[in-house]
Image (cartoon, rainbow, N blue to C red):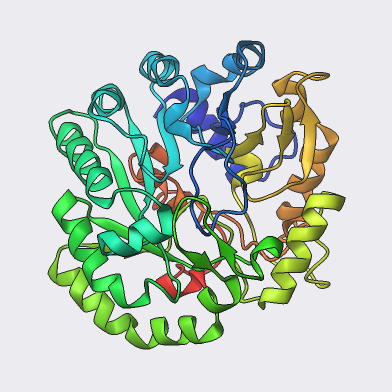
Amino acid sequence: MNHELTKLLRELDQRREKLQSGPAVIFLQTVRGCPLTCAMCQFEPSRPERISRELLAKVEPAFPNLEVLGIHGYGAPLLGDLDYFVRQSLEHDFVIHMNTTGFFLTRERADLLARTRLSIRFSIPAGTAPTYANIMGREFGRVLDNVAYLVERTQRTDRPADLWFSYIVMEDNLDEIDAFLHRAHDCGIRIVQFMRLRPQPRKRTTIRAKDRDYGFNYSRQAHPSVRERFIERLPEIQAIAADLGIEIEHGSLVERLGNPNALAQLVNNTSSRYLQRRVLPFKTARGICVAPWIGQLSINQSGIVCLCCASAFPVGDLNHSSLDEIWNSKHMRRVRRSFARERFPHLCGYCRGFDLKEYPRNTVFRKSSEKHLECTQNPIQVASAW
């Protein structure tokens, strides 16, 4: 562990308001827009746009102290300037993290990514080709073949990769979980997570895909009975995963939902979009989150810096301030002060925070989590993603 990260963890333990260390985790919207037509996505297909060099130049001073650089956010990260990010990762020895469908993964891109420290969550919401084609509008086998190739390439390096499959459980794929686990095993994936379908205002009625004969209705796909049936089957699912040597994780870099209902989430989604804050719950939770100290700043292509990847709350603008100034701004100090008192700021909504164990497994945070402060609650079980 380098000296800067050691100092950062010490400042976390001491609950400092003003930090001498810079952020160790940053999320960049490296690509804005995606041409895909995934049924459950809240965004319309659009032309991908890469982050500007001018904005990257304002973030680059933080690279030497980074442990994780997330390169996703409302776009297709595999269409970004991967050569640039792999080069920076190799020079500064940080993990490249992304969430992706994997559709734009090719063998050439896999060869490039396998050169460095890597953390990827592949969204695979199906266990069979027909269901995948309906939900994602793409060829299942092609995606699996390229993921398997990436897994094999990373296994031949001395840089362990942290590669997961993420499964959004819906009505149309609930009966394919067994097949999904076997597909993960065939690809060499040994960690999976199961996620709930988030409420989206525009998905309340049936939306018909323009490029295929498939209608998606949020109310049907995310009906409470889907959750109930999943929980009922969970012991059986866990047994199948164990037999295949697959671990079921709660998932990292995701909101910890305190079991709000769909209406409460919808209210917070709307208030976040228009008011830049969450209005629920009325009574904030008690606890601690490492993000205000470790980092997890989320930077969009306009230069707006938000508190973390799960918050729409802006803490600064790179067009007017440096990243160092934003990192110790009055907004950030106020958030740290609240967490130092073990109070979640209202802007966090139902999020239950992050702890060191939720960062990619190939980071120093996971390796040091047993030695440092245990943040937040008890270990989160798989069902908490609901």
Number of marks drawn: 0
Determine the residue positioned at 65% across, 43% down. Answer: 308
In this rendering, the answer to whether 60 lies above or below 242 is above
Determine the residue positioned at 79% across, 59% down. Answer: 270
Residue 237 on image: x %, y %: 27, 77
Q: Is residue 346 visible?
A: no
Q: Report the front residue among 297 and 141.
A: 141
Determine the residue positioned at 45% across, 67% down. Answer: 379
Residue 54 on image: x %, y %: 66, 11
Q: Report the front residue among 259 and 212.
A: 212
- Position of the N terminus by quadrant: top left
Q: Is residue 232 left or right of residue 59?
A: left
Q: Report the front residue among 157 and 14.
A: 157
Residue 318 on image: x %, y %: 75, 22
Q: Report the front residue among 366 and 279.
A: 279
Determine the residue positioned at 59% across, 48% down. Answer: 290
Quarter of the rendering containing residue 168: bottom left
Residue 338 on image: x %, y %: 78, 53
Quarter of the rendering containing residue 180: bottom left
Q: Is residue 225 visible?
A: yes
In this rendering, the answer to whether 91 lies above or below 235 is above
